[in-house]
Amino acid sequence: MQEKFRVTNIARDEDTGNVVLRVISDDKPSDSCENIPPSLEDYYLYVFGDIVSV
């Protein structure tokens, strides 16, 4: 998944035990995904995620 999409968070759902990924994508990665409002962290990673400082 990380090769295709920018993953901003990985967590485990305590109720189901499933792994939940938060990704930034222009397109819906799969039918089981749901669209949620972006956080400030999502925006930062979208804009500056590929910048490497020296």
Image: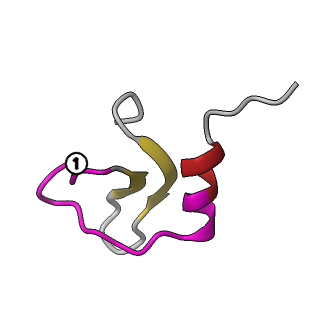
From the image, which quarter does the N terminus lie in? Answer: top left
In the picture provided, is 41 more to the left or to the right than 27? Answer: right
Tell me where residue 12 appears, x and y as whole percent: 44, 60
Which stretch appears magenta? Answer: 26-43
Along the line of sight, the residue nearer the viewer: 22 or 51: 51
Q: Residue furthest right?
A: 54
* Looking at the image, residue 18 lies above or below residue 45: below
Q: Magenta stretch: dominant SS?
A: loop
Q: Residue, x 57% and y 60% (percent of image)?
A: 43
Any magenta on residue 31?
yes
Tell me where residue 44 appears, x and y as whole percent: 64, 56
Which quadrant of the structure image shows residue 51? top right
> How many marks overall?
1
- Indicate the amino acid at tag 1: Pro
Along the line of sight, the residue nearer the viewer: 34 or 49: 49
In the picture provided, is 47 more to the left or to the right than 16? Answer: right
Residue to which mark 1 is pinned: 29
* Looking at the image, residue 17 lies above or below residue 29: below
In the picture provided, is 36 more to the left or to the right than 46? Answer: left
Which quadrant of the structure image shows residue 14? bottom left
Label 1 element class: loop
From the image, which quarter does the C terminus lie in? Answer: top right
Any magenta on residue 36?
yes
Q: Residue furthest front?
A: 47
Q: Please tell me how crowded label 1 is: few (under 14), some (14-19), or many (20+) other residues with Cα within 10 Å.
A: some
In the picture provided, is 44 more to the left or to the right than 5? Answer: right
Which quadrant of the structure image shows residue 13? bottom left
Tell me where residue 4 appears, x and y as whole percent: 34, 32
Q: Residue, x 16% and y 60% (percent of image)?
A: 32
Tell me where residue 49 appears, x and y as whole percent: 62, 41
